[in-house]
Amino acid sequence: MPSPPADTHLRDLARLRRVRDRIDRDYAQPLDVEALARGIGMSAGHLSRQFRAAYGESVYAYLMTRRIERAMALLRRGDLSVTEVCFEVGCASLGTFSTRFTELVGVPPSVYRRDAAAEAEGLLACVARQVTRPIRG
């Protein structure tokens, strides 16, 4: 199959960046692939394929990584419960949140909350964010 013309490819990349930027900005809102695709005039299937090709992960995985990053920051603060953090970052299910958190971070959110407060004490917030960023295997 021939590759798309350069201008079409660049236009698709710009639309994918808009989706990624929207996820970064609105991660706590209810977001789904269909709504994101509709917002840029693509089908959900095309968006899913193009997003994975451009960024190496699915739209859902990218969204969950952003949510978990924010959850990590909230848990380090220590003033919210795990349940409050779950809903604050836009997750509707505590079970799904805990499972995804554990997959990305390596420990359950309750353990992270307990341990992160002690470890991050004395670190600048920007340094703590960088060294504790979740990395998808």
Image (cartoon, rainbow, N blue to C red):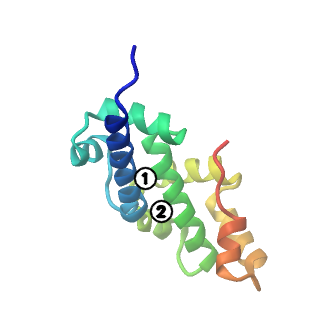
Q: Residue at x 55, y 38 (%)?
A: 56
Q: How crowded is mark 2: few (under 14 residues within 10 Å), some or many (20 or more)?
A: many
Question: Does residue 19 appear left or right of residue 134 in this picture?
Answer: left
Question: Does residue 19 appear left or right of residue 40 in this picture?
Answer: right
Q: Where is residue 51 in the image (x, y as percent from the top left)?
A: 43, 39
Quadrant (top left, top right, bottom left, bottom right) of the N terminus: top left
Q: Residue at x 39, y 58 (%)?
A: 21
Quadrant (top left, top right, bottom left, bottom right) of the C terminus: top right
In terms of image quadrants, where is residue 77?
bottom right
Q: Is mark 1 on a helix, strand or loop?
A: loop
Q: What residue is pinned by disc 1?
A: 93
Q: In this view, does 57 lie above or below 105?
A: above
In terms of image quadrants, where is residue 69?
bottom right
Q: Which of 44 and 83 is in front in this view?
A: 44
The amino acid pointed to by label 1 is Ser
Label count reads 2
Q: Is mark 2 on a helix, strand or loop?
A: helix
Q: Which of 64 and 14 is in front in this view?
A: 14
Q: Where is residue 121 in the image (x, y as percent from the top left)?
A: 75, 83
Q: Which residue lies furthest to the bottom in this view?
A: 122
- State which tag comes first along the sequence, 1 or 2: 2
Q: Where is residue 15 in the image (x, y as percent from the top left)?
A: 32, 47
The amino acid pointed to by label 2 is Cys
Residue 101, which numbered label? none
Q: Where is residue 39 in the image (x, y as percent from the top left)?
A: 23, 49
Q: How crowded is mark 1: few (under 14 residues within 10 Å), some or many (20 or more)?
A: few
Q: Residue at x 40, y 60 (%)?
A: 27
Q: How far apart are marks 1 and 2 (CA)?
A: 8 Å
Residue 86, which numbered label? 2
